[in-house]
Image: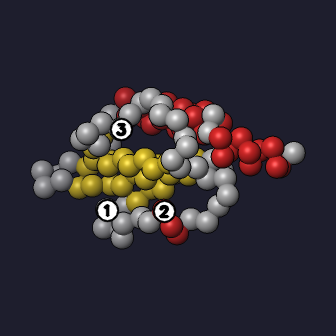
């Protein structure tokens, strides 16, 4: 429960991170379906993390839209999720929480 993925269909109300109550969720990755006027479907990706999580790659591009059928998106997303968790392990707050658990 370190990284939470929120998937939203087109037309859903915007997701608010304050709706999630957890001591361990440190990174939120929100993937929202966007239907464009030309009929194409894309995913808009937003990443939010606690302030003490160090920066990590890959970054979300300035234009955060990915073709829903692009196989590179799947690899990019997996890379993002793995590195999000690894970066969390380096955050001071998370290290303190782990020590309290043991």
Q: Earlier in the sequence, mark 1 or mark 2?
A: 1
Locate the C terminus and report the quarter of the image it occupies: top right
Question: Is label 1 or label 3 in front?
Answer: 3
Q: Nearer the viewer, residue 78 or 63?
A: 63
Q: What distance separates the C-alpha of mark 1 from that of mark 3?
A: 20 Å
Cα separation, mark 2 vs mark 3, equals: 18 Å
Label 3, secondary structure: give it.
loop
**Disc ID at residue 60:** 3
Position of 100 compared to 44: left or right? right
Write down the quadrant of residue 92 in the picture: top right
* Residue marked by disc 1: 10
Name the quadrant containing residue 82. top right
Side of 20 where 95 appears, left or right: right
Residue shown at 36% from the left, 47% from the top: 45
Choose between 43 and 60: the one closer to the eye: 60
16 to 36, vertically: above or below = below
Nearest-to-viewer mark from 1 and 2: 2
Label 1 secondary element: loop
Residue at position x 83%, y 49% from top? 101
Q: Residue at x 12, y 51 (%)?
A: 38
Q: Residues within 10 Å of mark 2 (few under 14, many from 20)?
A: few
The x, y position of residue 88, in whole percent, is: 60, 39
Q: Secondary structure at mark 2?
A: helix
Q: Give x and y (percent) for residue 26.
A: 58, 49
Figure disc tally: 3
User: Is residue 75 visible to the viewer in this orientation of the structure?
Assistant: no
Query: Can residue 28 be seen at all in this image of the molecule?
Result: yes
- The residue that appears at 65% across and 61% down in the rendered structure is 22
Give the spatial CA distance, label 1 vs label 2. 18 Å
Which residue was labeled with disc 2?
17
């Amino acid at each position: 429960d370190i990284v939470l993925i929120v998937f939203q269909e087109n037309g859903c109300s915007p997701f608010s991170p304050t709706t999630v109550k957890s001591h361990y969720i440190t990174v939120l990755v929100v993937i929202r379906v966007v239907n464009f006027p030309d009929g194409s479907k894309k995913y808009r990706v937003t990443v939010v993390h606690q302030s003490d999580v160090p920066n990590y790659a890959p970054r979300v591009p300035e234009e955060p839209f990915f073709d829903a059928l692009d196989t590179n998106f799947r690899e990019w997303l997996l890379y993002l999720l793995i590195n999000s968790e690894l970066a969390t392990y380096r955050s001071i707050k998370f290290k303190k929480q782990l020590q309290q658990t043991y």
